[in-house]
Image: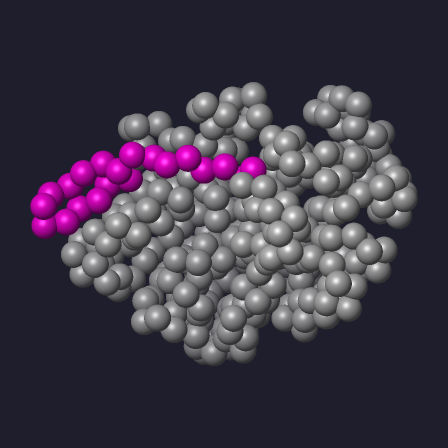
Amino acid sequence: MRIGIVGFGVGGRRFHLPYIQAATEWELTGVVARSEATRSSLAEAAPGVPAFASLDALIDAGVDAVVITTPPATRRELVLRALERGVHVIADKPFAPDAATARELISAASAADRMLTVFHNRRWDTDLVTLRSVLDSGALGPVWRADFALDQDDRAVLDQGPDEGLLRDLGAHVVDQLTQLFGPVDRVDAHLDWFGSRDARVDVGFFLGLHHASGVFSSVSSTKGARRNDRRMIVIGHEGNYESHMADVQVDQLLAGLTPAANADVWGVEAEERWGVLTTGAGAIRVPSLRGDYTEFYRDVHRALVDGTSPSVTLDEALHTVAVLDAARESAETGERVRVAVRP
């Protein structure tokens, strides 16, 4: 199938292009890239792939699907236009600024009879895939609570404005991860760290307390404004705990010049010294890293289109994630625990 990318900033270049290139089920038809600098970057990263000036020009060239990875403020209009033109759509996260807009996009996809899915690629993070295997093994017994953190010393990438902020960015990822592990969220307690003032302020950090309908309580925090890097996953159950401090393996490998297509034998596997530790009554053991690979997201979408089934990232799940973020913003503003309005 033929696919195009709309937008070629950090997201398009680092989180989409390498994995589309590795997924041989797809042919990359072109990229919407307007500035000369962006077109030069595309020519270096994907020689021979044409650049287009607009979404319509890309669709006119012939595509089955497009990836919308432009800034959040532009995403709604482009998703609606692509669906109107009759192509399937992969929307970067957050695919909508609020639940009302999410419902609008879902309705448009239904009316167009085209697939719309959301790029929750971090379901295929190395640490999450490995943690899932620990939970599936039953070694922890019934889970009581979990503590996740994803701190990055990367304040410069946060744009200021009402449609930006860390909660909508990394928050969308970690909320999706935790709901995948422990089920839908019923209630939220939240705090946001703000940078700037008035209409120009942006949240550069958050702490969320998620009360899952399953009875599990998870806390998740992140910051891009505190000059620190940390990544942890701690899960506590009746029989013990699992603790992981793995790196952002796939991003680190890309920055080191590796790609999932050229380096498949080592791709997405954490170094042994950073393996997680499972501690139970039998003692502590290091859990070997499983392979994380965002390429699986694109293979999954292709399978769903061929088979006429739903992709792994369903719209009900994506809408629930947006609703959790809505509740978190309300909780941070009011200081109250807020019930999530939409459950999958």
Which x, y percent locates residue 265? 45, 23
Which x, y percent locates residue 153? 50, 40
Which residue is at the front of the view, 112 or 198?
112
Which residue is at the front of the view, 111 or 157?
111
Which residue is at a point 60% across and 57% down the rendered structure image?
309
Which residue is at a point 46% across and 65% down the rendered structure image?
191
Q: In which quarter of the image is residue 289?
A: top left
Q: Quadrant of residue 287?
A: top left
> Is residue 292 located in the magenta-colored stretch of the structure?
yes
Which residue is at the front of the view, 75 or 133?
133
Which x, y percent locates residue 49? 79, 28
Which residue is at the front of the view, 110 or 283?
110
Identify whether 313 is placed above or below 329: above
Residue extent of the magenta highlight: 276-295
Identify whether 7 is placed above or below 138: above
View extreme (front): residue: 307
Which residue is at a point 34% across and 55% down the rendered structure image?
147
Whether residue 270 sits left or right of residue 236 in the image: it is right
Whether residue 111 sits left or right of residue 178 in the image: it is right
Identify whether 251 is placed above or below 327: above
Residue 36 can be seen in this image: yes
Which x, y percent locates residue 237? 22, 59
> Is residue 293 located in the magenta-colored stretch of the structure?
yes
Residue 169 can be seen in this image: no
Which residue is at a point 76% across and 22% down the rendered structure image?
47
